[in-house]
Image (cartoon, helix red, strand yellow):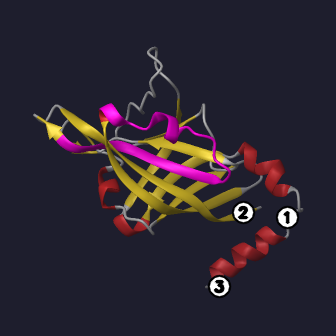
Amino acid sequence: MAAVLALVMISSTAPANADQDHVAELEMLTVSVSRVQLSGALVSIGLDESGTLAPPVDPHVAGWYVGGSKPSGVGRTVIVGAVDFKGETGVFWELRQVVVGDLIVIRSKSDSVHSIANFLVTEVTLYRKSDFPTARLYANLAYEGVALVTDGGPNASKTAYLGNLVVYAQLQSRVLVY
């Protein structure tokens, strides 16, 4: 308990406008869900030549879409990761164990601040790839949110998953350490 109080005391010494000044500059570092022992580094990703989200090359790393929101302002941050790859577990292997009420923690930093953002899982949904909710995933939100996305559902002949698992969460708290 003392460590949490110390963090709050340190963050309360920052100027009132510090959140707006520094949070937009944050570089995302990690994503984790401690209850299911999911943890991984975050890298920025974009779209490939066909206009689809290009997942990280390394299946042990998650990627956040740079064309969307960061977890430092209103909107939904989209983070993708592999469930498995060539017989190995991927960064989001444990994502299928996440349930409503779990906390997703995203750690970020800039030159002057370290942020620990806690997002409360509000929905876990498995979609068929043909029914993927692209418009919903990238829709404008009036709050800060994240969506973790990976392959899911039946694995067709062990060559391709037939669906996508999407975990939606909403910002519950943020601690800024200056």
Residue 2 in picture, x, y percent from top left? 65, 85
Q: Image check: 128 left or right of 21? A: left
- For badge 3, the amino acid type reads Ala
Which amino acid does the dot numbered 1 rest on?
Ala
Residue 167 among magenta residues = no
Residue 9, position in %: x, y? 77, 76
Which residue is identified by label 2? 176
**Left of 164 or right of it: where is 5?**
right
Three-letter residue code for mark 2:
Leu
The mark tally for this picture is 3
Element assignment for label 2: strand
Q: Which mark is residue 14?
A: 1
Q: Quadrant of the N terminus?
A: bottom right
Q: Residue furthest bottom?
A: 1
Task: Name the element at disc 1.
Answer: loop
The magenta stretch is 130-154
Q: Quadrant of the C terminus?
A: bottom right
Distance Cα–Cα, label 1 vs label 2: 9 Å
Q: Nearer the viewer, mark 3 or mark 2?
A: 2
Among numbered discs 1 and 2, the one appearing first in the sequence: 1
Q: Quadrant of residue 56?
A: top left
Check the image and name the residue furthest to the top.
Answer: 49
Residue 2 image label: 3
Residue at 47% of width from left, 53% of height from top?
A: 168
Q: Are marks 3 and 1 in contact (CB under 8 Å)?
A: no
Distance from disc 3 to disc 1, alpha carbons, whole Å, reads: 20 Å
In the rendered structure, are the residues bearing label 1 and label 2 in contact, judged by CB atoms less than 8 Å apart? yes
Q: Earlier in the sequence, mark 3 or mark 2?
A: 3
Above or below: residue 91 compared with residue 55 = below
Callout 1 crowding tier (Cα within 10 Å): few <14, some 14–19, many ≥20:
some
Find residue 57 and report its horizontal and vertical position in percent. 38, 30
